[in-house]
Image: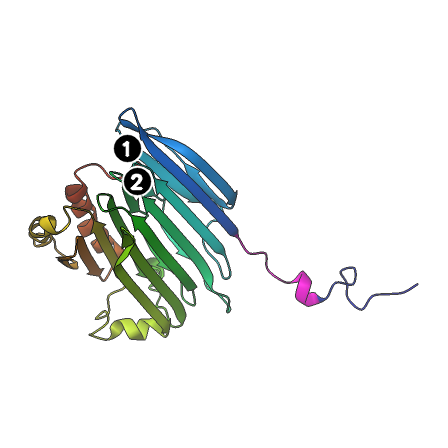
Amino acid sequence: MSVSAWPFDGVPPSETHRRQRAVGRVAFGAAGLDGRTRPMRIEESGSMRIRLPKGGGKGLDAVLVNTAGGIACGDRFSVQVEAHSGAAVTVATPAAEKVYRSDGPVAELAVDLKVAAEARIDWLPQETILFDKARLRRSLSAEMTENASLTVFEAVVFGREARAERIQEGLFEDRWRIRRGGRLVYADTLRLDGPIDDLLRKPVVGRGARAFATLIHAAPDAEARLDAAREHLASIGGCDAAASAWNGLLAVRFCAMKIESLRAAAVPFLLAFRGEPLPRVWLS
């Protein structure tokens, strides 16, 4: 009788102890038909799902669900959303997305948006919360026609407030690229690597703030809305915010010590700016 040196049927420990990583993909498309937005294509795999709650408006709300319960080291997720001519799609998440600590591997999230003529996509996920030692690389790319409309809002929180957690070590890379009519009109990359809490304490980086958000509105009317955006931002408190506009884009940055302060500023701004209610999952 032969006895294996390893207890699991001769499989090396490096193989048996290797973690299973979550992989998920969603591809969703919608089109404008008879004055309403109708789903045309839904593809789901792995731990990513998309749900379409009933709404009373002409647009369509889509809710992305990560059944993995968060993002861990080495996970891979991709989301593709396409709004065909005349469609209006709002994409949200049911809760904040948590990014857990990693012992080395980097998690990745890739978002790909396509907006056709006279269509609209509002990308409105709730905030992403990074734990200490989290490692996340995410990207957002958008292709839109000249007369399409795109609104992107993303918020990120560094550390769990309830635990007074600080990011002593981690990686956060956020890459945005927006093309209109085939031309690159917006490019922004944020990369924080190493002692993120120390970096955020620097006056030229974050002055100790831990919650940040960016809104980009790309549409034919974007620059014309700058004065109204600044007027609304002037009335908020507990959160630093500023707006600028150029080349058919409107950009708003939010910066706060706590996510509660950021949400207290961003939610009424989004309500006023969009002129319609936020997705119901934001209120749950």
In the rendered structure, the answer to whether residue 191 lies left or right of residue 134 reads left
On the image, the x and y values in percent for residue 133 come to 43, 68
**What's the amino acid at mark 2?**
Thr
Corner quadrant of residue 244? bottom left
Determine whether 142 is above or below 49 in the image.
below
On the image, the x and y values in percent for residue 260 come to 24, 53
Residue pointed to by mark 1 = 59
* Picture disc at residue 186: none
On the image, the x and y values in percent for residue 113 come to 35, 48
On the image, the x and y values in percent for residue 68 come to 50, 49
Residue pointed to by mark 2 = 90
Chief secondary structure of the magenta span? loop
For the rendered model, the colour scheme is: rainbow
- The span shown in magenta is 13-22
The reply to whether the C-beta atoms of the residues labelled 2 and 1 are less than 8 Å apart is yes
Quarter occupied by the N terminus: bottom right
Q: Nearer the viewer, residue 166 or 67?
A: 67
**What's the amino acid at mark 1?**
Gly
Q: Earlier in the sequence, mark 2 or mark 1?
A: 1
Corner quadrant of residue 109? bottom left
What residue is shown at x 24% (from left), y 43% (from top)?
A: 148
Outermost residue toward the top?
34
In the rendered structure, the answer to whether residue 217 lies left or right of residue 98 reads left
User: Mark 1: which secondary structure?
Assistant: loop
User: Mark 2: which secondary structure?
Assistant: strand
Outermost residue toward the front?
182
What residue is shown at x 65% (from left), y 63% (from top)?
A: 17
Tell whether position 15 is magenta: yes
Determine whether 263 is above or below 37 in the image.
below
Quarter occupied by the C terminus: top left
In the rendered structure, the answer to whether residue 2 lies left or right of residue 37 reads right
Tell whether position 128 is magenta: no
